[in-house]
Image (spheres, coloured by chain):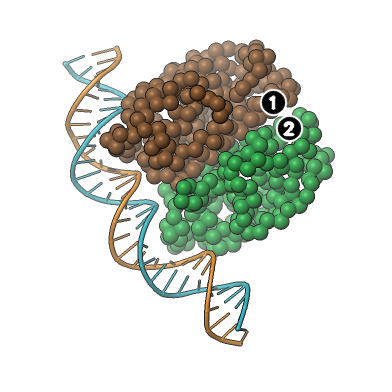
Chain colours: A brown, B green, C cyan, D orange
Amino acid sequence: MMLEPAEHAAIERAISEIKVVPARTVMVEAGETLRHSALIIDGLMGRTISDRDGLRQFVGLHLPGDFVDLHSYALSQLEHDIASVTHARVAIVPHDRMHALVTDTVLARKLWFSTLLDAAMHRAWLFRLGRLDAMGRVAHFLCETNARLRAVGLSDGRRFALDLTQNDLAEICGVTSIHMNRILRQLREEGLCIVRSSHVEILRPDWLAARGQFDAAYLYLDPDAA
Amino acid sequence: MMLEPAEHAAIERAISEIKVVPARTVMVEAGETLRHSALIIDGLMGRTISDRDGLRQFVGLHLPGDFVDLHSYALSQLEHDIASVTHARVAIVPHDRMHALVTDTVLARKLWFSTLLDAAMHRAWLFRLGRLDAMGRVAHFLCETNARLRAVGLSDGRRFALDLTQNDLAEICGVTSIHMNRILRQLREEGLCIVRSSHVEILRPDWLAARGQFDAAYLYLDPDAA
DNA sequence: CGATCGATTGATTTTTGTCAAAGACGGTGG
DNA sequence: CCACCGTCTTTGACAAAAATCAATCGATCG
């Protein structure tokens, strides 16, 4: 989020506790009244909406460093669940301490900005689900995740650790897990990329980006990232 | 947005001009550097992302009263287009005048809140595209639009004017216009609702909501709306 | 070692997209 | 006033994509 050291320190001071969340646990349920937001220290967390049969659609995936539910500060309740994917640790920032933070209008704008980035990512996901076929969706998601992880030093641009099951990927891309399995095999057979549980290797980044019609503009990353 | 009269007046004073946008015109192109935001006075506008063949995916639809690209204030450029659907009039608010507005921290929070509502709607759209079949998507969209129009007095809960072609609906729901046509016929034949260009009549609001698994919570509307 | 969870595969059905062509409708210019 | 035109809607036949059903396989864990 490109915070000044002083801002970073201010946020750190606002942390009331560190919470450990086991893998595959719902941390926040839709409709719950919230009095704090959470910042991911490590692990993966997802924002999910369930249909009437309990089948989930991921509407966002959060990496270490992300403010996972800053939205709840202003909304006070969320219309989706927040669940861990892997084992995770989060820093809890009570909303009443947040009030103090946002009196700094510069920091307030940065926090606002970060929620706007979430919205921009939502829109990219809408494009993905609305206009791409299953393989395109997977390609797009992998490119996005590669870019995001690279921005925080967790990918070298081709390989990165990613602890998602094929079922998780299916819930992200809006397809069945069986179909996801076939798509991953195809990607492997066509030499585009290799996706294993916990690890991704992109063999042809440019081809994959073309297949997923991926353009990183919506991530608003530093242009000079490695 | 539940503004106080004084806040409303402040925003009105910030308007620099009223712009007329003909139907089906791109007002803002992705990547453009923006120095102002727009508030819809009348007409429909959409936020769209095009694929490489120029096929569009709507990632949002804006009604009169909506701040259509408040996001651009903080982002300074957008990663999607903003285009009119019908003929429209918008009020232009220059970003430098916005700076003055957001020194009022209460108003700043309300503007922030309104962008968070956009994000919440994006998430509902993600659910729609990711988990619902074509008929469910249409049902969900119609319920949403009915609820939003009702909130601003433009629907009685069953009938409302809506100037969208079947192709627009298709671009919103992520299906082909041919398939959209078939879905609308089915909805008509099953007695759920009648969609004509420019007019929608919902015959069984509860059935339609069930078919689209629609729950208005994400709109954060006043509970006591008519 | 059995149990469980995730990955994998084949056969089949359902949904949706594609191609091609008409029909309806309003607006425009002759 | 009417013929023409473009846009939107409608329909049918067919192809492609994805879902569903039913197993099997493999690894990990108590």
User: In the drawing, does residue A143 fall left or right of residue A72?
Assistant: left
Rendered location of residue A193, percent (x, y): 34, 31
Q: Is residue B151 visible?
A: yes
**Decide: marks 1, 2 in contact (CB < 8 A)?**
yes
Secondary structure under tag 1 reads helix
For the point 73% across and 25% down, which residue is it?
A105
Could you tell me how far apart the alpha carbons at marks 1 and 2 are, in whole angstroms?
9 Å
| Residue A150 image offset from top left, x and y in percent | 48, 24
Co-location on one chain, circles 1 and 2: no
Quadrant in the picture for the N terminus of chain A: top right
In the rendered image, which quarter is residue B12 located in? top right
Name the residue: 43% across, 18% down: A87
Amino acid type shown at disc 2 = Ala
**Does B25 appear above or below A150?**
below
Reading the image, the residue beneath label 1 is A108
Q: Which residue is mark 2?
A: B108
Disc 2: which chain?
B
* Mark 2 Cα-neighbour bin, 10 Å: few <14, some 14–19, many ≥20: many
Residue A29: where, in percent of width, then height? Answer: 52, 28
